[in-house]
Image: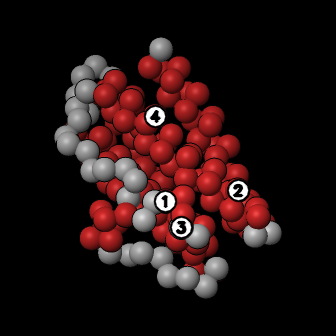
């Protein structure tokens, strides 16, 4: 089914699945980065995956708050994630490009959820989504600046 046709609670599960795969991609970037930006990027990747872990829990618990069940199996995450698993990336620019693109995919679905939650007067979900959107808009500016 096309993502646009799903209810926003179902979209929250697509978002959760996408964050879970993104999280593991970030761990892989943290482990495999090479080059003279190693120390900078190794730390930056850790900062981003640590924040992602917190977001994952907030999204899953919002799904529960709305009376539905968060996906929790890796097989379901792989099936539903909008972000594919990465091959091994050691180049810093490729890694940062991946993050910028992944964040744009996440932003797209967060904006869709925000609109639908707003139509349903679900202020709690709107608040969570607008926090995530604002945060990613800011970090995307920083990642784009790093890439030059
Ligand atoms: Fe580490």
Residue bearing the label numbered 2: 115
Packing grade of label 4 (10 A; few <14, some 14-19, many >=20) is many
Answer with mark 2 or mark 3, whichever residue precedes in sequence.
3
Q: Position of residue 30 (x, y in %)?
A: 31, 42
Q: Are marks 4 and 3 in contact (CB under 8 Å)?
A: no
Residue bearing the label numbered 1: 3
Answer with mark 4 or mark 1, whichever residue precedes in sequence.
1
Tell me the SS state at disc 3: loop
Label 1 – label 3 distance at C-alpha: 6 Å
Q: Position of residue 52 (x, y in %)?
A: 48, 54
Q: Position of residue 68 (x, y in %)?
A: 55, 82
Residue 47 seen in this snapshot: no
4 vs 3, front mark:
3
Relative to 140, 129 lies left or right: right
Residue 67 seen in this snapshot: yes
Relative to 86, 131 lies left or right: right
Label 1 – label 2 distance at C-alpha: 14 Å
């Amino acid at each position: 089914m096309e993502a646009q046709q799903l209810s926003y609670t179902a979209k929250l599960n697509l978002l959760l699945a996408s964050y879970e795969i993104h999280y593991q991609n970030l761990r892989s970037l943290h482990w495999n980065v090479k080059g003279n930006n190693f120390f900078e990027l190794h730390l930056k990747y850790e900062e981003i995956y640590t924040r992602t872990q917190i977001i994952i829990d907030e999204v899953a618990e919002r799904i529960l708050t709305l009376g539905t069940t968060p996906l929790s199996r890796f097989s379901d995450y792989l099936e539903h994630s909008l972000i594919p698993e990465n091959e091994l990336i050691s180049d810093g620019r490729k890694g940062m490009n991946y993050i910028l693109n992944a964040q744009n995919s996440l932003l797209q679905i967060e904006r869709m959820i925000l609109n639908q939650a707003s139509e349903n007067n679900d202020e709690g979900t709107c608040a969570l989504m607008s926090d995530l959107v604002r945060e990613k808009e800011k970090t995307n500016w920083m990642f784009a600046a790093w890439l030059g």
